[in-house]
Image: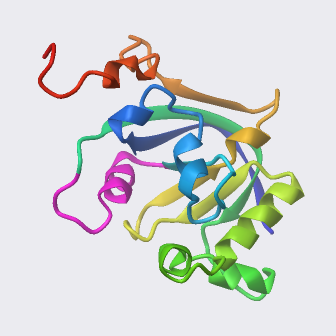
Amino acid sequence: MILTELDRVAAYRMHLPKWAATPISGEGAKKLGGRANRPGVAALYLSLNVETAVKEYRRTSTLFSPGTLVSYQATLRPVVDFRKGFDSSWDPIWEDFYCDWRELWFNGRIEPPSWVVGDEVIASGAKGILFQSHMDSKGTNLLVYTDTLCDTDFLSAFDPQQALPRNQDSWQNPRGKND
C-alpha cells in the first residue's frame, strides 16, 4: 500500500438532507455498506472538488434528489493513496477495488472484494483511501473510516454560520405542515 498524509485538505459531499445533521458520522454508509466498507463499518465518502461531489451524488441520473453540499477540512495520518490505481506493486486484491459492489452485494449477496480491501486498510491503521472517481474522470474521492480517527486527526464540516441542522427534529414534520 502507498501511504500518504493529508494536511488541512478541503473536501466536499452532497448529503441527503436528513444526514446533514450528522455530517461526519459515517452512519449512512454504515447502514448498507459502500465501495470499501461493509455494513457496520462507519465511512464517509468525500470528494476533493465540488464538481466530483455533485457527480458522485447524482451518479448516472440527469435528475437527482435534493441535497445539501457540505465542505470539510481534513488532516488525516495516514491514508492509502490509490489515485494511480492498481499495478503489480499492490496486493492482488486491490485489482478488484472498482468492482460493481452494489451488483455483487444487493443482487448476488456476494461479499465484494473491495470490502476485504477496506478491512485490510483499517487493519493497517490507515484512516482512509484516496481513489479516482468513476463518476468524474478528473476527480478524486476520499473515503474516511470515521471510527478510526484519533486525537492527531482532524475532520470537520465547515459551518461557520451554523446553517446545518443540529439534530433530526427538522425532518419530523410531514410535508406541508408548518411550511
**Which residues lie in the magenta part?**
47-64
Residue drawn 74% across the image and 40% down it? 147
Viewed as shown, does residue 172 lie left or right of 134? left
- Residue 157, given in percent of the width and then of the height, sits at 51, 27
Q: Nearer the viewer, residue 84 or 20?
A: 20
Which of the 4 image quarters holds residue 120?
Answer: bottom right
Whether residue 45 sits left or right of residue 42 in the image: it is left
Name which residue lies at 57% across and 41% down: 27
Q: Position of residue 177 (x, y in %)?
A: 15, 18
- Answer with left or right where residue 56 lies relative to residue 23: left
Magenta-span inclusion, residue 110: no
Task: Determine whether 47 is above or below 33 in the image.
Answer: above
Q: Quadrant of residue 6?
A: top right
Give how far across and how far down residue 52 sits, in percent: 38, 55
Residue 84 drawn above or below residue 176: below
- Left or right: 91, with 46 as reference point: right
Q: Quadrant of residue 33?
A: bottom right
Q: Quadrant of the N terminus?
A: bottom right
Which is nearer the eye, 27 or 3? Answer: 27
Identify the residue shown where x is 81% and y is 32%: 150
Q: Give the residue at the far right of this rendering.
A: 124
- Which corner quadrant holds the C terminus? top left
